[in-house]
């Protein structure tokens, strides 16, 4: 596989990923905002976020169940999470490309980057 | 303000920031955060979280376009991403322990540094075919040109790598893409052609940002009702900006913008020291 064909396939994946994330965010906002329009925005003072907005599993659960008032924001956060996964997919894809070319130096580089990303999300 | 008008106002402001960012060639994060902090009175941590999400959105869109053109260099990008991602982890951790006043000051100085860095006129010529280490690591490529592709390569790899660690730390610490610092490392230190440096930087920014965003998410810095309208606004704005770029008066816009960013940078520093310059 040539660099050029890897790059053009990767470009398609990246566009698809961004569009998918944008669609979920728009859908989430469309569901959340009408029912919660009268809520005050609470971002002037930092309070952190509840666990259903910080842990992917809980986020997915609430997003699917579309739980209680206010918790539907989990669907928006799921869209945000989709967006955040884009660069991870980018690295995995590049890793596969380098492996196909048996370019071990760059396979190792990609693995090191993936390790840093995993540390951020799971540590 | 109630959440509905708030989100609409935030999305509109982000869209304008996205348009301006695309026109003058500066990323979203460095503009969005001061707009949210100084304009909307939002806590800097929520602002940084939202900005970092928008950085991932725009860099993914832009990087996809550049990858197709074959200008960005995946090997150089991946190799230097090792430096930026570990730097970003350190920066994101620092962001959770430093007081917000200190963040504001560092942010202001990073803004001012970005202005100085972006004053350089883009070149595009090949300056080096790479030194021994650059060739050994295969940090090389070819630049498409009218008279046939011109080979280029990286030199001063250790210096560039260290600068990339710094760029990563700034990205995680401030929730910015730190594109100007990445271009500094590639273009000025490693002598990689400017066009390749900027497009490869776009490829790297999203990956760097992802390394800090996991930590931001767990610490509750990412509020979906803020991050989503910001990301969507910036995305739409960047798209519009790219479309009107050929007909926009970019030169006078740049001057105006750099003056504005300088003032904002000074305000962020002053804010950190407890002054409000209004």
Image (spheres, grey):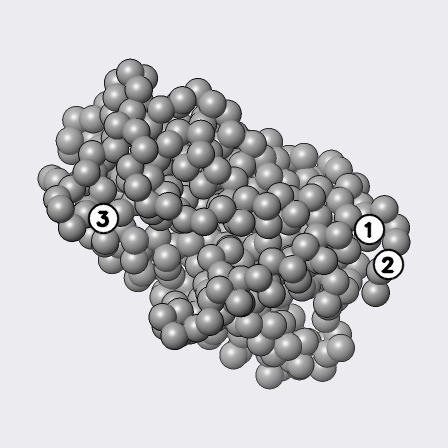
The image quarter in which residue B255 lies:
bottom right
Q: Are marks 2 and 1 in contact (CB under 8 Å)?
A: yes
- The residue identified by callout 1 is B270
Tag 3, which chain? B
Residue at 62% from the left image edge and 81% from the top image edge: A35
Give left or right: position of B40 versus A10: right
N-terminal of the pair, mark 2 or mark 1, is 1
Relative height, residue A23 to residue A53 (above, below): below
- State the residue in front, A119 or B190: B190
Q: Position of residue A63 (x, y in %)?
A: 51, 65
In three-dimensional space, the C-alpha distance between marks 2 and 1, rounded to whole angstroms, equals 7 Å
Tell me if I can see residue A41 in this picture.
Answer: yes
Quadrant (top left, top right, bottom left, bottom right) of the N terminus of chain B? bottom right
Q: Position of residue A62 (x, y in %)?
A: 54, 63
As helix, strand or loop, the secondary structure at mark 1 comes to helix
- The residue identified by callout 3 is B70
Category of crowding for the residue at label 3, using alpha-carbon neighbours closer than 10 angstroms: few (below 14), some (14–19), many (at least 20): some
As helix, strand or loop, the secondary structure at mark 2 comes to loop
The image quarter in which residue B228 lies:
bottom right
In three-dimensional space, the C-alpha distance between marks 1 and 3, rounded to whole angstroms, equals 43 Å
- The residue identified by callout 2 is B276
């Amino acid at each position: 596989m040539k660099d050029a064909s890897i790059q053009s396939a990767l470009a398609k994946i990246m566009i698809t990923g961004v569009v998918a994330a944008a669609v979920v965010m728009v859908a989430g906002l469309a569901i959340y905002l009408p029912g919660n329009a009268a809520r005050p925005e609470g971002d002037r003072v930092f309070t952190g976020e509840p666990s259903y907005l910080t842990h992917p599993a809980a986020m997915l659960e609430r997003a699917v169940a579309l739980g209680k008032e206010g918790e539907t924001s989990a669907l928006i956060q799921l869209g945000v999470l989709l967006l955040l996964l884009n660069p991870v997919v980018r690295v995995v894809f590049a890793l596969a490309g380098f492996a196909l070319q048996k370019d071990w130096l760059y396979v190792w580089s990609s693995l090191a980057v993936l390790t840093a990303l995993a540390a951020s999300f799971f540590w | 303000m109630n959440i509905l008008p708030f989100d609409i106002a935030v999305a509109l402001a982000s869209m304008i920031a996205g348009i301006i960012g695309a026109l003058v060639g500066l990323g979203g994060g460095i503009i969005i955060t001061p707009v949210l902090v100084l304009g909307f009175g939002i806590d800097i941590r929520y602002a940084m979280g939202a900005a970092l999400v928008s950085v991932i959105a725009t860099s993914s869109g832009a990087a996809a376009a550049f990858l197709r053109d074959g200008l960005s260099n995946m090997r150089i990008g991946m190799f230097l991403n090792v430096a930026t991602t570990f730097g970003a982890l350190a920066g994101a951790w620092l962001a959770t322990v430093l007081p917000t006043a200190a963040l504001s000051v560092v942010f202001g100085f990073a803004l001012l540094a970005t202005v100085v860095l972006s004053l350089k006129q883009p070149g595009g010529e090949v300056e080096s075919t790479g030194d021994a280490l650059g060739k050994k690591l295969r940090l090389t490529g070819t630049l498409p040109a009218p008279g046939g592709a011109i080979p280029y390569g990286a030199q001063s790899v250790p210096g560039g790598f260290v600068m990339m660690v710094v760029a990563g730390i700034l990205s995680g610490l401030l929730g910015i893409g730190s594109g100007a610092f990445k271009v500094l490392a590639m273009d000025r230190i490693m002598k990689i052609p400017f066009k390749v440096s900027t497009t490869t930087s776009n490829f790297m920014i999203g990956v760097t940002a992802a390394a800090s965003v996991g930590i931001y998410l767990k610490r509750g810095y990412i509020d979906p009702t803020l991050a989503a309208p910001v990301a969507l606004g910036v995305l739409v704005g960047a798209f519009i900006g790219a479309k009107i770029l050929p007909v926009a008066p970019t030169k006078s816009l740049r001057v105006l913008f750099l003056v504005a960013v300088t003032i904002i940078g000074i305000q962020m520093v002053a804010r950190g020291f407890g002054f409000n310059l209004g």
